Amino acid sequence: MLAIEIDGDSHADKLEYDNERTEKLESYGIAVVRYTNSNVLQNIAGVYQDLKRRVAQIKADRNKVPL
């Protein structure tokens, strides 16, 4: 499972809240990826490439079999 968050200017003063929410989601096994509004608007190709890489890594990590 994966949560993708696009953060705008309103998140600048909500770092503690965002961190707590991320910890809670991760405790349920949900990976959290964040991008800024400006990054999405100005570099969508880069965001897409980064997201593809992260999804592939998440899949690889979850398919590892513990020894």
Image (cartoon, rainbow, N blue to C red):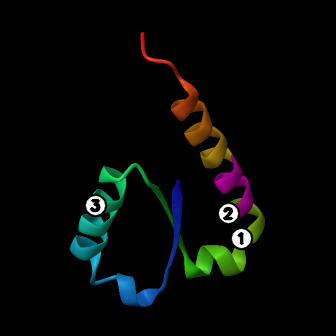
Q: Which residue is painted at 73% across and 70% down in the image?
A: 44
Q: CA distance from mark 1 to mark 2?
A: 6 Å
- Secondary structure of the residue carrying tag 3 is helix
What residue did someone put label 3 on?
Answer: 24
Q: What main secondary structure does the magenta stretch of the protein show?
A: helix
Q: Quadrant of residue 41?
A: bottom right
For marks 1 and 3, give the one nearer the viewer: 3
Instruction: Residue 11 in the image: state x and y as whole percent.
Output: 37, 83
- Secondary structure of the residue carrying tag 2 is helix
What amino acid does circle 3 point to?
Lys
Callout 1–callout 2 Cβ contact below 8 Å: yes
Callout 2–callout 3 Cβ contact below 8 Å: no
Instruction: Residue 4 in the image: state x and y as whole percent.
Output: 54, 66
Identify the mark at residue 47; answer none if there is no mark.
2
In the picture shown, does residue 26 fall above or below 9?
A: above
State left or right for residue 18 relative to residue 43. left
Residues rendered magenta in the picture = 47-52
What amino acid does circle 2 point to?
Val
On whether residue 58 falls in the magenta region, the answer is no
Q: CA distance from mark 2 to mark 3?
A: 24 Å
State left or right for residue 44 relative to residue 34. right
In the picture shown, does residue 62 fall above or below 64?
A: below
Q: Residue furthest right?
A: 45
Q: How many callouts does the rendering have?
A: 3
Q: Which residue is painted at 24% across and 75% down in the image?
A: 17
What residue did someone put label 1 on?
Answer: 43
Q: Which residue is painted at 44% across and 54% down in the image?
A: 30
What amino acid does circle 1 point to?
Asn
